[in-house]
Amino acid sequence: MARDFPPFPDDIPTHPLLIVDYEKVKNRDQDEIEKLWEAATKLGFWYLRNHGCSEEADRMFDLGADVMALPLSEKMKYEQGNDGASAGYKAAGANAVDATGEPDLVEFLNVSKDDVLAWPRPGKRSYPKPATDRMDSTIIPFFRKCMEVNAVLLGVFEEKLGLPSGTLARRHLDDEPSGSEARITCTPPMKDTERVAIGGHTDFGSLTVLFNRLGGLQVLPPGSDHWQYVKPLAGHAICNVGDALTIFSGGILRSNLHRVLPPPGSQANSQRWSLAYFTRPGNSVLLQPLMDESSMISNAVNTVGETHGLVTGGQTAGEWFARRIKNQRLDNRKASRYSPSYRWDLIAWAGP
Ligand SMILES: O=C(O)CCC(=O)C(=O)O
Ligand SMILES: [Fe+2]
C-alpha cells in the first residue's frame, strides 16, 4: 500500500488533542499521567506517541489492502450478518449512519481477539485467506502490541479512579471471550466530502487505539454543535475512551461522540484506510459503575445522579455489544421505531 498521502488541508478548522507519550506513561511519569487523565476526562480523545506499534500497523494495512482487493462475492462469504455478531466483513452500505437510514460508505473487516488467541485452533468464525495466511506474521503481533498498550492505559485509569489493583484488569481478561477486536476500514474516494461515511457514535467498549493516515475523523467537542476534524499526525495513534469505561467510572471518563466523513480537500481523491483496536470487557462482565470499589466513583454517581444518560439496566458487556452491533445494521431497522426526532446518538445507548 502507498505510504505517502496528500497533506491534510491547512485551511480547515481542526480540534486539538493533547499528545500523550506512551513510554512515559508506562514508566509512571506523573506529568504525563496528568495529561492522559485530563484528555480522558475532558474530551475522551488524545494522540498517543511512542506507542511502538507502527510497523505492526503498517503490516495490517497491507493485509487490509489485500483483503479489500478480493471480489465482493468472496468477501461476502465472511459477512458479519444481522444477528449482533461483529467479527467478519461488513460491506459498504450495510449499516445506517443516521435516523433516516442513510447507508454508510465504508467496508471493513473485524478480526476477533478470541479467534486470534485461539489460532491455529478454530475460533468462532473464519476469515478471508489473506488474513489467515498472515495470522502469525501480522495479526498476532499487532494484537499483542495493542493489547499491551490498552492494558497499560487501563492500569493508569484504575489507579487514578482509586480502584483496588486489578479491578479493571479482571474485567478485561485476555482469556475471557469478549468483543475485543481489530478493524481495518476502507472508504472509497468520494467527490462529496460532506456525506457521512460512519455515523456519529461513541465506541462501545473500554478503549480504542486508532491508526489513520488521512483526515475524515471528526469529534463533537463537549458543549458544541459543530463537528470538528481531528488531523492525523504521522507516527501518532489516536486513542479514545469507550462507553464501558464511562459506565465503570460513573461518568468520570468520557466516551465522546465522533463520526467519519470522506477525507477533506485534495485527500478526497484517495482511498481512506483506518485501523483500530477495540478493547472491550469480557462478555460476562456487568456494565455498572464500580461504586463499591471506589469512593471517587460513588461520589461521581451521587453528584451526577446517573451515568451521563447511559442506561445499561445492568446488562452484561456481551449483551450490550450484540445489541449495539445489531442496531447499526440497515436490515434490522424498522421505520416506525425511528422518527426524525429520534436521538440517533442515543439509540445505541438506551434504545431498543
Ligand atoms: O476511521 C476512523 O477514523 C474512526 C473509525 C471509528 O470511529 C470506528 O470504527 O469506531
Ligand atoms: Fe468509533
Image: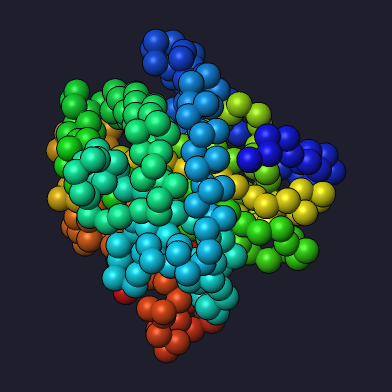
Task: Please say which color scheme the image uses.
Answer: rainbow
Question: If the image is split into quadrants, where does the C terminus sit?
Answer: bottom left
Residue 157 appears in the picture as rendered: no
Q: Which of 72 and 168 lies nearest the eye of the viewer?
A: 72
Q: Is residue 212 left or right of residue 95?
A: right
Q: Residue at x 80, y 46 (%)?
A: 12
Q: Residue at x 54, y 40 (%)?
A: 61
Q: Is residue 120 left or right of residue 216?
A: left
Q: Position of residue 183 (x, y in %)?
A: 45, 48
Q: Position of residue 129 (x, y in %)?
A: 40, 50
Q: Residue at x 60, y 62 (%)?
A: 197
From this view, report whether residue 204 is shown above or below residue 135.
below
Q: Is residue 205 left or right of residue 271?
A: left
Question: If the image is split into quadrants, where does the N terminus sit?
Answer: top right
Residue 5 appears in the picture as rendered: yes
Q: Position of residue 199 (x, y in %)?
A: 55, 63
Q: Position of residue 180 (x, y in %)?
A: 31, 45
From this view, report whether residue 97 is shown above or below residue 304.
below
Q: Which of 310 and 67 lies nearest the eye of the viewer?
A: 67
How many tags in the picture?
0
| Residue farthest bottom in this picture | 336
Q: Residue at x 63, y 64 (%)?
A: 196
| Residue farthest right in this picture | 11
